[in-house]
Image: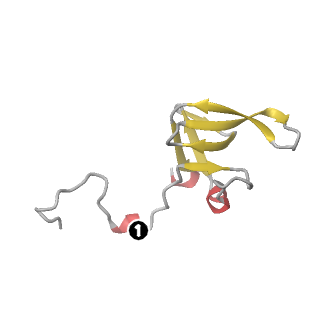
Amino acid sequence: MTDPETPEIPGTATTGSEATAAPALPDRLSTDPASPYYDEDLLTRGVGIKFRGAEKTNVEEYCVSEGWIRVSAGTARDRKGRPLTLKLQGPVEPYLRGAE
């Protein structure tokens, strides 16, 4: 029951089902284990990326707040054996693959 003196803010109501819901995805995530934005547990659960409305499967890193993704550039590698990446700007929408 809501208190009539307290204004209700949309999107802040909590229900019992939200307590068991999956945690929110981070603002930034990387698939590189050397990155500080790497989260193995989250990546094993399966994270999907929609970039400009299209599904992307070759995303190496993303940042929602800055609006960019890094995608691998084919099979090209740098001198240390890491894939070469391109930074693309646009709206980024991450989601958990099993929770669609």
Density class for disc 1 (Cα within 10 Å; few <14, some 14-19, many ≥20) is few
Quarter residue 86 falls in: top right
Q: Residue at x 52, y 54 (%)?
A: 25
The residue indicated by pointer 1 is 19
**Residue 100: percent from the left, percent from the top?**
51, 49
Report the front residue among 67 and 40.
Answer: 67
Q: Is residue 88 above or below residue 22?
A: above
Name the element at disc 1.
Answer: helix
Q: Residue at x 56, y 43 (%)?
A: 63
Amino acid on which the number 1 mark rests in the picture: Ala
Left or right placement of residue 88 versus residue 52 in this view? right
Q: How is the image coloured?
A: secondary structure
**Residue 78: percent from the left, percent from the top?**
85, 37
**Residue 69: percent from the left, percent from the top?**
61, 37
Q: Quadrant of the N terminus?
A: bottom left
Q: Residue at x 54, y 45 (%)?
A: 94
Q: Is residue 51 above or below residue 36?
A: above
Q: Residue at x 85, y 37 (%)?
A: 77
